[in-house]
Amino acid sequence: MQDLNPDGLQRIFKHLKVWLCSEMSHERERAMRTAAEMLAFYLNHLNIKKMGAFHNLGALLGELIPRCTDPSPPVRLAAMDCIQALLYVQLGYEGFDLDHKDEAVDKLGTLSEKLTSSDMTVLYRTCSELTKIISRHVPQQQLPALVFTLLDGLADPQTDCACSSSMVLHVLLKSRGASLQDQVPEVLEAMRVRSPAVSEEQVRTVVAQTLLVLAAQHLQTVVNVLISFPLPFDSWCCEIWFSLGAEGTLTFQIMEMILEKLNVMVPFVDKKDSVVRPSTVRVATGPPLAMTCALHEMMLNGRSQEAVAGLFPRLFGALVVRLGSSVGVLPPRDAPAPARPRRGARPPNRRPPSTCAALCCYGCRVAVEALRVLLVRAQLEKMLRALKLVGAWEKIRDLQQHTEGVTLLARHMAKHAGQHLPAIVDNLHPNLSNIYECQRITVTAFFSELLNHRGVTELQLMEALMSHMTERLADPCCAVRVLAMRGLGNIATGSPEKVNMYAKQLLAAMSSGLEDKDDPSRHIALEAMSGLSKVLLCLDQKNVQILVVYIFMKIKPFLENENERVRCSSMLLLGTLSKFACGEPVFRDQIHNVLVSLLLHLSDPSPQVVKASKFAMRVCAPVLGSEIVTAMFQNHLHDDRGLHHGEFINDLTKYIIRDFPSMLNFYHISIVQFFESPWPEVRASAAMFIGFLLVNLPEEHLSDMNMGSVIKGLVHLLQDPDPLVRAKAAEAMGHFHHF
């Protein structure tokens, strides 16, 4: 009576509400009966002339509604009396006479009769009807307080009351949630914060369904809030995303929204490694990582299959790009370590715990896991088994083997899921001009391998992919240019019948690759030579002949490259080019120009280079114009047979002197140049070669030799650190007595 207003009511009620959740039923009964008497008194003494806002209506209702399913029937009945009194108080504050009768509020008396039932189904149904009445009478400004108080009730020690809190919340938000736009972030945060205290599975399930209701009403806001929650996602967040994967059209809309966001978000930032070191490291940004985790959780739900089927090309493309954006990238620095699960917190019938928390520290692994689940939902289990057998996932996660892993992924997509490739190519194509070179590398590697497969032609993708690869030859990133060059070479395998149609473009592109100035490791040149070797096998004579000498001159410097793969590829390409020579004198001259190099590399430290050198000399020999030399090369230079190098060179020099006397001056100058070779085996071979040339040289050809340069070179080799080189030089010097 001294403080007959909402604040006075609240001050007294706060002393009662601590007893409403008591574990002792008689204490709850006394507290609720006292509350009922107090509210009846408040209603009877309400002064209508002093109207104002009943600002704590929502909070009071939130405390009382769950008690309508209390294990104690007296508590349930008293709770209904309290609610009825509160609603009439509210009507009084709205200006109605105290004797005004509201049909819906009066109906609560009828509902009270049902609260005596011991059947929980009847009690929950009664609570649902009660909520519909309350929903119509609670003013908009009181709705947030009611919602947040009901959220507190989710952890009520009385399980039935906690369940009714969740159900009332669900019904209330279903009817009034659309008006809570500004409160949605707070509601979701309150759900997340309270979730650790909620152990009842039924309550968690209803809360998840309630969140789906909010998502349907405020999709953009709900998705944005869920994505903003800290990484790694806790079990509640994972369960919510899992439940969002079961809602058909809603699932489709959420996935589509996430895909749109992923396309425009910054995947990582460059940050200083430490205060003392100036180097930078790439650190993942949180939102894209969270979205990848969200997609993973949603797709874990088997009911997401229909949405996944409709979005498969876009999902696949987005996750492939995420792979490129994540490999070698550190996790967000503000991400806490995954928390240990609470002992006994997960009931046995809850879905398996997500791997999201364990994966969050490894962004690329998150994308890999999401991609694996996507393939499961797309019913590509056979492809998954094949990828596992070749270790594709491990390679994709490894910075050094990433492109190899992506190549394996593309290979098996072409084999097992070709029907999806046209749409996937369309979705991935824009990323080729992305500012992030890591994404361009990944997509180029994927496209490059697709060109290696026959299905690309059947799907009419070859022209588009070839165009994409040709454009990437101008990419500022060397790795992208390497992969683009590889893709063009792969056309000879995937679409051999198309090679002649695009001969001019292919030869021009690969010839330019041999001249790339920004290629210190010669990786682009290596791919260009490898591609040319494959493409030339498919080309007609007329399409190549005009470029034979030009290409030959471009590859000649690579014969002495320090990279054995480059030397090997240049020799193989040299041999392949020979089939287009057709006895042309200009090509014969080019073969003479490299013959010394090929002969000396029969001593190359690399067995593969030796093998390539033998191949090149066997196939080029007919162009030289000497039947005996051709026969020697064909009979002695076998890949799987050893060679007595000294004896072979000794015999060969005799035929060279006889059949190519005009080339002797060029030959001996070329041999002397190899005295400076970086490989001691080649220097020793050069000394031996010059020695046999001297011993077999007739006197009439003496004038063809510059003895001064030969002697000077051999004297220099006598000081060589390698004993074999010194020995061969000494042997060669010994042949001067011949003159």
Image: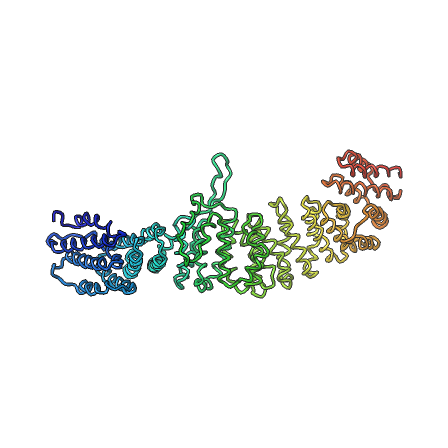
Quadrant location of residue 687?
A: top right
Expressed as whole percent of the image width and height from the top left, the position of residue 679 reads 73, 41
Depth order, front residue of 401/299: 299
Residue at 30%, 64% in the rendered image:
121
Q: For the C terminus, give its image quadrant.
A: top right
Residue 254 position, x and y percent, is 40, 58
- Tell me if 400 is positioned left or right of 156 in this view: right
Q: How many marks?
A: 0
Q: Nearer the viewer, residue 357 or 568?
A: 357
Q: Is residue 40 left or right of residue 290?
A: left
Q: In the figure, is residue 632 to the left or right of 52?
A: right
Nearer to the camera, 90 or 510 = 90
Residue 80 image point, x, y percent: 21, 59
Residue toward you, 226 or 473? 226
571 with respect to 330 (left or right): right
Task: Specify whether residue 388 is in view.
Answer: yes
Position in image of residue 676 (x %, y %): 74, 39
Say if residue 262 shows up in the picture: no
